[in-house]
Amino acid sequence: MQRYAILMVCTGNICRSPTADGVMRHLVEAAGLAGEIEVDSVGTHDYHVGEAPDRRAQSHAQRRGYDLSSLRAREVCADDYRHFDLILAMDEGQYSILQRRCPAEHRHKVRLFLEFATRHGEREVPDPYYGGPEGFEHVLDLVEDGCAGVLQHAREQLKR
């Protein structure tokens, strides 16, 4: 069976990328593709390794039916560039870091997450960490849009 692996990336892996991870896992499961599409998330920095997603991110996601509670932060590692088929940065800063660290033969895998959004014109998912509740809701709006597009892309890659 063919598999397609997707990695969501933000800075500390406690807000944006675990939100995208949780939403994507939910969509993959609902589509009956859990055995074919793998989803994970990481941070470009080691600030929060081993920690659960931010409680506000978890709370807002839970209200929309997404469970982030089992996720734990980790930092991107060299094996990730080889293992994952699509590596999605939440913003330009992470995109630059990933491109610099990524071996040349895998750089084509690194893209901006919102390239896959169809309802929003933004290029970056803003960091909600220092803001209020509306920031987490806006992230969820962007992530739901982007994940729908990522799922479609993954289906095309799997020819499903």
Image (cartoon, rainbow, N blue to C red):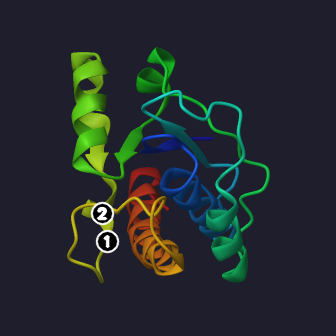
In the image, 96 versus 2, the foreground residue is 96
* Amino acid at pointer 2: Leu
Q: Position of residue 11 (x, y in %)?
A: 43, 41
Neighbor class of circle 1 (other Cα within 10 Å; few <14, some 14-19, many 20+) is some
The residue under the point 50% across, 26% down is 83
In the image, 98 versus 103, the foreground residue is 98
Tell me where residue 63 sits by quadrant. Answer: bottom right
Q: Position of residue 12 (x, y in %)?
A: 50, 40
* Amino acid at pointer 1: Ala
The residue under the point 63% across, 38% down is 73
71 sits to left or right of 20: right
Neighbor class of circle 2 (other Cα within 10 Å; few <14, some 14-19, many 20+) is many
Q: Is residue 85 above or below residue 14?
A: above
In the image, 138 versus 108, the foreground residue is 138
Residue 117 bears which disc, if any? 1
Mark 2 — residue? 114
Q: Are marks 1 and 2 in contact (CB under 8 Å)?
A: yes
Q: Is residue 42 above or below residue 154?
A: above
User: Dot 2 lies on which element?
Assistant: helix
Tell me where residue 51 sits by quadrant. Answer: top right
88 sits to left or right of 58: left
Quarter placement of the N terminus: top right
Q: Is residue 22 above or below residue 95?
A: below
Q: Position of residue 157 (x, y in %)?
A: 40, 51
58 sits to left or right of 48: right
Q: Is residue 12 above or below residue 77?
A: below
Q: Position of residue 21 (x, y in %)?
A: 58, 54
